[in-house]
Amino acid sequence: MTVRRQVRIKYYAVLRERAGRHEETLETTAVDARELYEELRTRHAFHLPQSQLKVAINAEFADWSQNLNEGDEVVFIPPVAGG
Amino acid sequence: MSSFEFRNAQFDIAHERRELEDAAAGGYASFEGWVRAQNEGHIVNRLEYEAFEQLGAKEGERIVQEAIARFGVRHARCIHRLGDLAIGELAVWVGASSEHRDEAFAACRFIIDEVKHRVPIWKKEHYANGDSGWVNCERCSDHGATDTSPEAHRHDHGANAGHRAHTAVAYDYSRQTTLSGIGARGQARLAASRVLVIGAGGLGCPVLAYLAGAGVGTIGIVDADRVEASNLHRQPLYTFADVGRNKAEAAAERVTAMNPWIVVEAHAERFTGENASQLLADYDLVVECSDNFATKFLVNDAAVLAGKPAVLASVYQYEGQLQVVRPDRSGSCLRCLWPEALRDGMVGNCVESGVLGPVPGVFGSLQAVETLKLLLDLPGQLESEILIVDLGNLVQQRLKAPRCNDCEGRPCSRITELPAAAVADTAIEVTLERAQARGFQIVDIREPAECIATPTLIECIRIPMADLLMNPAVLPRSAGVVLMCARGRRSLATALELRHAGNANVWSLRDGVAGLEQV
């Protein structure tokens, strides 16, 4: 049986623009951060490949393979360079 | 006994300071003003002081009480001479006793500065040539502060020559030395500090203004760019008249005018792999305020190699990120987050994506705060963390960024040497002439709105960058494809990404549409 988890996601910079929102809460079957991003990439037409991003889970930078738990707060952070 | 007095005859300091003695005081500081033998080039034989005594004594009393309240000293007094004084005579004496020395020094400094400004005292100078003249001390101070002669505001472009405005008013740091944790000792520490600021743009402007205001003794500014009209909304160091000037030069001039008591060194050059180590060698700390990844990684790497702290920030539209790199304390660095240097063009910069003026203002101010905390060794510093602030919704986050495994040794094992100056990637960048000669298909990857705003007559097909990266299969299967954007940065990044994904026949048009217009 597929496990569904509810996670809270925050977006910054170009991802926030493309998603059209600062954050959202959704139910996902994604096991880890990598799967979650792929799911969102399709959903919001994100153009940035995962290799260009960092992910933080519960306020700590995490590996893409880190498993997701119910209630996790996931932040996808694109790099920014403006000055 | 009043704490401020006028005296018409010589007085004994040893007697006066007894009034300041207190079992709870750990020290006493004093200032003595003497009559000197020359003023503004004239030989002075003697002086006469005159005051509006009734008003002056009240104001003097107020000043001393303010100092006691402000600095928390045990006791303070000030005595000002009136009448005839000979060269070398004591003209004014200030004394303060306190538990610790910082407060006593600060109180003395405050009292003498305020007395000079606020107490109505005039002096008549008798010159060696027989002339004499009345000099209002207050008017004298104002004259110094508003002196706009080139000599008074000369700034230094070289590495060594210092400068001082020859003014009667000293720069007043009292509003910050009053803070616990700073005091006279902290101020001396700032005066001895040397900070290098890379980039005098949206982030650099507030960094420079606040570090100069704080009295950081030596500030270096590296920037090869010129001021553009489109910079002014977020770079308040510059005026409209500065458009076209080199930024390092214009910023150095402005910052020197803001605080002539510090040394400002303008380096009108790009920060590259070739000059990085040498530039950094002369400074204790670097503040990274550039607008591109290539420079940000270079600054990070140079700082890690030199074992010196770096304060980094980047902004995007309404938000930004702040990171303090502490190779001197084994903290994480930019490469702990992004092991491989990121390519410019994949995410927008201020030119491509826009930015709200005060956003870099906020992040530059945060950089200035972290720099001062670091120099003063104050608590609460950002370390091995990233601060992300979205000013669009006023949400901020601190994300822990631990030092990565590869960085266990110092310096980071990934950073072994600095790359030479960035050179155009000729293997992937082509000119229009070359693209047409080889029969390449040109693909305009700009957004539809950009294509309308800046049309081009070049024969091409249009696939916006995002669509292309989402689905590279839409690329025509011709012998070769040349991507074109506004300036050649997005197209280069996209071409590199597509090649990385296995599309070997992709090139980028150097300098983009902007390059075509110049032809």
Image (spheres, rainbow, N blue to C red):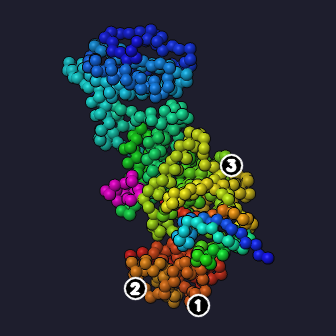
Quadrant assignment for the C terminus of chain B: bottom left
Mark 1 — residue? Answer: B477
Q: Which residues are magenta?
A: B232-247
Question: Considering only order in the chain, which callout, 3 or 1, is on the residue closer to the N terminus?
Answer: 3
Which SS type dominates the magenta stretch? loop
The reply to whether the magenta stretch includes residue B238 is: yes
What is the secondary structure assignment of the residue under circle 3? loop
Count of numbered circles on the image:
3
Q: Label 2 marks which chain's residue?
A: B
Quadrant of the image occupied by residue B452: bottom left
- Give the label on residue B330, or none: 3
Q: Is residue B148 above or below residue B118?
A: below
Point out residue B126 in the picture as x, y percentages from the top left corner: 24, 18
- Report whether B406 appears left or right of B255: right
Give the amino acid at mark 1: Arg
What is the secondary structure assignment of the residue under circle 2? loop
Point out residue B164 in the picture as x, y percentages from the top left corner: 39, 37
